[in-house]
Image (cartoon, grey):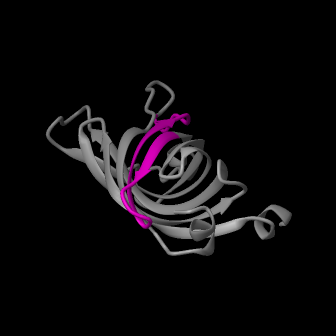
Amino acid sequence: MLVFFGSAQTGGLRGGLNFSRSITGIHLGGFVNLGHSEKFSNQFEASFSQFGTKQTDDPDLPEKLNYFKIASAFKFYPRKDVNVHIGPEFGIPLNSTDESNDFFRLFDFGLIVGLEGYFTKEVGVGLRYYAGLHNFGDDDSKNFNSAIQLSFIYLFKSKQLETWGH
């Protein structure tokens, strides 16, 4: 709690496209950024995100998996309007075509690595790679979610941004 109350805060919205194997999905959510200095911050995110692949038994039938995602990103700002970030991301399945309904088999966990840049004080874009670390396939198959995410970002006005000259 000391980190939360001792930090400058800002929030915003992010949304865009997930390019996941042969499926294009969407992601949409919000975030809170807790700035510790002009160079470092932690960002906490909650979002809806789609991943998927074409099924192996019918290559023309795509399968999208919808997740509620929770992420935490450690951010470094080499410039005021640019950051690089890395952190864990957890996914809770919202839909499944798996007849066993095995929640833990479809649960997703991975790592995000990305870059964000801002055109104005409030508007920016992000490019991120998500590498799934949890096999959601059966014992014989190796199925890991992975995606390149292109995001459009809107920051709410805040004292943190004003203080740091954004």
- The majority secondary structure of the magenta stretch comes to strand
Residue at screen point 57% across, 48% down: 89
Number of numbered discs visible in the structure rendering: 0
Horizontal and vertical percent position of residue 135:
51, 34
Q: Is residue 91 magenta?
A: no
Residue at screen point 53% across, 52% down: 80
Boundaries of the magenta span: 113-137
Task: Between residue 42 and residue 68, name the one nearer to us.
Answer: 42
| Residue 36 versus residue 110 in the image, above or below | below
> Please, which residue is most extreme toward the left here?
60
- The quadrant in which the N terminus is found is bottom right
Horizontal and vertical percent position of residue 101:
48, 53
Horizontally, residue 22 falls left or right of residue 1, namely left
Horizontal and vertical percent position of residue 73:
60, 49
Task: Between residue 119 and residue 108, name the one nearer to us.
Answer: 119
Task: Between residue 136 and residue 48, name the one nearer to us.
Answer: 48
Residue 118: image quadrant is bottom left
> Please, which residue is most extreme toward the front here?
165
Tell me if residue 27 can be seen: no
Residue at screen point 69% across, 67% down: 8
Q: Is residue 130 magenta?
A: yes
Task: Between residue 114 and residue 22, name the one nearer to us.
Answer: 114
Tell me if residue 117 can be seen: yes
Residue at screen point 26% across, 37% down: 55
Horizontally, residue 154 falls left or right of residue 33, namely left
